[in-house]
Each structure stands twice: as C-alpha cells, then as structure tokens.
Amino acid sequence: MNNLVKPVLRLLPGEEYLESLREGRRVLFQGEWVKHVTTHPAFRNAARSVVRFCDALHAPETTNTLPATDRCQEPLR
C-alpha cells in the first residue's frame, strides 16, 4: 500500500485544502501521533491561516491585490 500524498499543482480553495490535510497524513508531534492536524491545538491555527489565504486568492474582490503566480511564474489559481 502506498501512503504517499499526491502533490497538488494548484492552490486549493480553503475547504479543499483542509480536506486534503485529512487524507491519510501521519504526523508525529512531541512523541505522539496526531490524529487530525486540522483540529489539533498545535496545528489548527496554522491550518486556518492558510485557509484564509487560499480563500483570499480565490475571492473576486482580492484578485487584483494578491499575487496570481508563484516565484517561478506558475499560476496559483
């Protein structure tokens, strides 16, 4: 069985990003396995911050104020 997470080649909308974090990840934090990084106190705020950024990139009102490409000029959306 292959437990590798498939890479995503585009920046996901916020909820899709959160869902991708729930797909079979194994995270060891301070000697304990984390069941859900989206709800664990050590990771949930960081995950929610990324969700807000992803949602802002996809929001029509911020399209002209946030970058649409990464440093290699690959599209983020």
Image (tube, grey):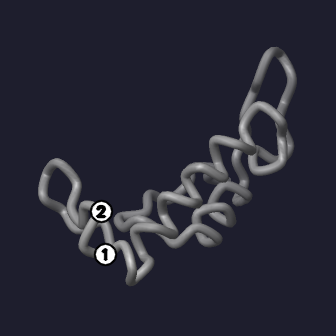
3 over 31 or under it: above or below: below
Mark 1 — residue? 63
Left or right: where 24 falls relative to 76: right
Residues under numbered marks 1 and 2 in contact, where contact means CB atoms less than 8 Å apart: yes
Q: Quadrant of residue 14?
A: bottom right
In what element is the residue under mark 1?
loop
* Residue 31 badge: none
- Residue 73 spot, x, y in % from top left: 13, 58
The residue lying at 76 percent from left, 50 percent from top is 38
Viewer-closest of 51 and 28: 51
In what element is the residue under mark 2?
loop
70 over 17 or under it: above or below: above
- The quarter of the picture where the C terminus appears is bottom left
- Residue 22 spot, x, y in % from top left: 73, 58
- Crowd band around label 2 with a 10 angstrom C-alpha radius: few (<14), some (14–19), many (20+): few
Q: Amino acid at mark 2?
A: Leu
The residue lying at 43 percent from left, 63 percent from top is 8
Judged from this view, the residue extending furthest toward the bottom is 60
- The quarter of the picture where the N terminus appears is bottom right
Judged from this view, the residue extending furthest toward the left is 73
Q: Amino acid at mark 1?
A: Thr
Q: Quadrant of residue 28?
A: top right
- Crowd band around label 1 with a 10 angstrom C-alpha radius: few (<14), some (14–19), many (20+): few
72 over 26 or under it: above or below: below
Mark 2 — residue? 66
- Residue 58 spot, x, y in % from top left: 42, 76
C-alpha gap between disc 1 and disc 2: 6 Å
Viewer-closest of 21 and 26: 21
